[in-house]
Amino acid sequence: MSCVAIIAAAGLGLRLKRNIPKPYLLLEDKPILAHTLRAFEDCSDIAMVYIVVAENKIDYCKQHIVDEYQFQKVAQIIPGGEKRQDSVYNGLHKIAADTDIVVVHDGARPLVTPQLISQCIREAQACGAAIAALPINDTIKQADDNGQIKKTIPRDGLWAAQTPQAFKYSLLKQAFDEAYQSNFCGTDEASLLERMGHKIKIIKGSNYNIKVTTPDDLVLVEAMLKNMKHMRR
């Protein structure tokens, strides 16, 4: 079985209000993207990794991430597109058509584990598509444009999607092609398969597998990373 990963790391991370793009911010003296790539490097099910970054950061990523931390599985660094969907599609075009499983992951989720990656791969091999997600525990309110509550949405059966998201290559390629033909833009890869009517298996993710989006997230992830290291001792 041939499994390839696409790491989406072309975002600028404007909400972090830093001068450095999000993938290259330091997390315990190592760039966020380097932490993310380590999990895929250590996952025995992953054969190759394609990183999608901002075009003006390709050389920087190669020198200061791939070469400096000696990642052996990185096959290519690819320029991103206008939106995340465009970036992942750029990566998909570089993957060999005989690939079995494609795993898509956010470069800004640095605490993903090789075990979670492998779980998603196994389920995708069995049923075509699988994503990591967490059940929603908070009460969910729907509001109008003025911030007034319209109703409470029952949280039973509601999940917050994460990455990794794993798919059979042929299914993911078809989903992307049909999305672009219809000018459809999804919020994640799973949504592209959903509109095709394909069933997707949910794998319970991890509270540690958060996406760094705000300054508070960066502080939280750093605390989580320290806790993970302490637990391993």
Image (cartoon, rainbow, N blue to C red):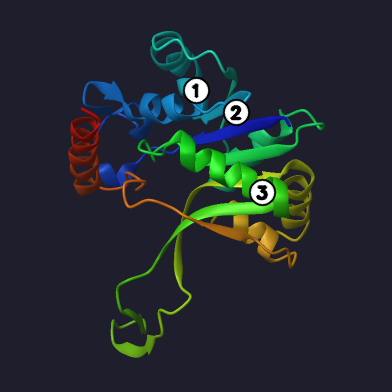
Which of the two labelled residues, at mark 3 and mark 2, occupies the earlier sequence position?
2
Which amino acid, mark 2? Ile
- Residue corresponding to mark 1: 41
Q: Which residue is drawn at 75% across and 64% down?
A: 196
Q: Identify the secondary structure beneath mark 2.
A: loop
Where residue 211 sits: x, y (%)?
A: 36, 46
Which amino acid, mark 1? Glu
How far, Cα to Cα, is label 3 from label 2? 14 Å
Question: How many tags in the picture?
Answer: 3
Crowd around label 1: few <14 · some 14–19 · many ≥20 (10 Å): some
Where residue 191 sits: x, y (%)?
A: 61, 60
In the picture, residue 190 is in which quadrant?
Answer: bottom right
The mark found on residue 124 in the picture is 3
Image quarter of the C terminus: top left
Crowd around label 2: few <14 · some 14–19 · many ≥20 (10 Å): many
Q: Pointer 2 and pointer 1: residues touching (CB < 8 Å)?
A: yes
Q: Identify the secondary structure beneath mark 3.
A: helix
Q: Which residue is drawn at 57% across and 46% down?
A: 120
Q: Identify the secondary structure beneath mark 1.
A: helix
Q: Residue at x 46, y 14 (%)?
A: 66
Which amino acid, mark 3? Ala
- Residue corresponding to mark 2: 46
Which is nearer the eye, 205 or 88?
A: 205
The mark found on residue 184 in the picture is none
How far, Cα to Cα, is label 2 from label 1? 7 Å
How far, Cα to Cα, is label 1 from label 3? 20 Å
Where residue 1 sits: x, y (%)?
A: 73, 32
